[in-house]
Amino acid sequence: MNRRETLLITAVACGLAAGCIPEKRIVWSPSGDHAAVCTPNGLFVIDDKGTPLPGKITGSPTRCAWFKDGKRMVIVHAAQAKGWDDIAPLFDDAQRAMIATEARAVRERVLAHNGPWNQFELDATNRFSPGQEIAIVLYLRDKESAGLAEKLKEEWDGIAKATASIWQAQLFTVTPHALSPGIVLTRSLDEIRTPKISPKETLVAFPMTAADAKNDDVALHIVSITDPQVKLVASPVGIDFDWSPDGRELAFVRSTSQAANKNDESIQLGSLTTMAVADADGKVLPQWGPRNDLVGMLFNPVLGVRWLRDGRILFASIEVTLPATSRDMPRQWSLFSYDPRMPASVGRALGRDFSEALDPGLAMFEVSPNEESVLLPSPKGRVSSYNFRSGSTTIIQGQDDPDGKFRCIPSWKSDTEISMVAPVASADGAKATNEVMIWSNGNTRTLSDGWTDEMREGWMDGK
């Protein structure tokens, strides 16, 4: 959300779940025997045939990561809070005092404002995270509202109905009959994105807006599964990242030149960066290791990163030569490889003869379990695969989405099986519908036969 929003838009957006950036909706267990379907309406567990199993979480956007045994998950989900009393326990005494002070200051500014309300800025200096903004609005409405309804008139209606999403990352045990909730790792008004479990399965890393972030910047955090104290790793960063094979370091793309505000369209520089956060036993370090900026690049929050078992780091980037005018800037990203054994240079992971178009707004990719191939998003929901060994390209899904959208990031079920969203033509000639399919060696089968509207809504149904 643009940080230079009006008070009203900030308020009514309190309960708005994210969904602008396509996500990996089908997340397979390590064995491929079952998967989690992460939707805007909940998390559902399915078997190998796509049949829904009893365990589910409903009424909330969800994201998840599997433990190696396929019997446990970290699930990110959200609960709705109606007002300040529901969210107050998320803050300590000092934070609650700050929120109260800021709410009173906002009230005075509202009462003194004489211009159009679309010119009123809740946080003109970008001092607060989106979650803090939400807290200030709800405190203002519930505790300091005297005179505001009369001043705001019809604008007050949206604020009066505002709610908040309390995001939380939580451990769950998966059985054939249920999802059993376990320890809550963290709770926040700021959106928590897709978690990743460390190779030693002692820590969970996740992107989330930092409490001191500017311009809605995303920050990378970690938390121990036995001692849930969230620690900030770096900010601002992209939404994708990866653990090192030994579980001691994190690799991510960070911005090295922040924009003044979200309306600032100037070029931002960035880097592929690694940082040590855990010891050999997988425990959180008392102090982070040095920040290693490995490769310079143009920053974009949706640049994918994967740390391979042989030590190489794959990352998405746009290849540029400076100086350059805006007309000289390339429009397509590619994949590159950083090898710590040869740190003086960066190699191309995709051959220069790779001719398939890539989705210009989504530089995310998925590496196969054997790390020999990669799934790449093409425009309008199409998907291709590139084999690193042979240099060959395979069209996995070559049809345009009915609405020209990219529904979800495809995922590997095994080294040869891929799950994806694909359009299916209607027998009566009506508009094609979307289904989740499994592709294997050129053959496909439908996974989503019999899925309920609840499982489809918000990502498969054309919205």
Image: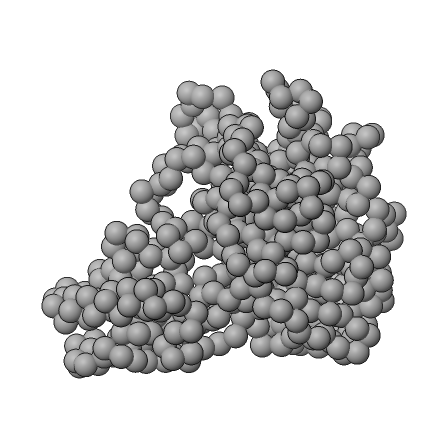
Outermost residue on the top side: it is: 344
Whether residue 379 is visible: no
- Residue 258 can be seen in this image: yes
**Does 234 appear above or below 16?**
above
Query: In the image shown, does 352 or 403 lie closer to the viewer?
Result: 352
Kindly identify the residue that appears in the image at 63 percent across and 49 percent down: 283
Identify the colour scheme used.
one colour
Image location (x, y in percent) of residue 82: 42, 80
Relative image position of residue 84 (x, y in whole percent): 36, 77
Tag count:
0
Using residue 445 as the reference point, say whether residue 132 is left or right of it: left
Question: Could you tell me which residue is drawn at 37 percent across and 71 percent down?
Answer: 12
Report x, y in % for residue 416. 85, 47
Comparing 282 with 438, the one in front is: 282
Expressed as whole percent of the image width and height from the top left, the position of residue 185 reads: 58, 64
State the quadrant of the C terminus.
bottom right
Q: Quadrant of residue 148?
A: bottom left
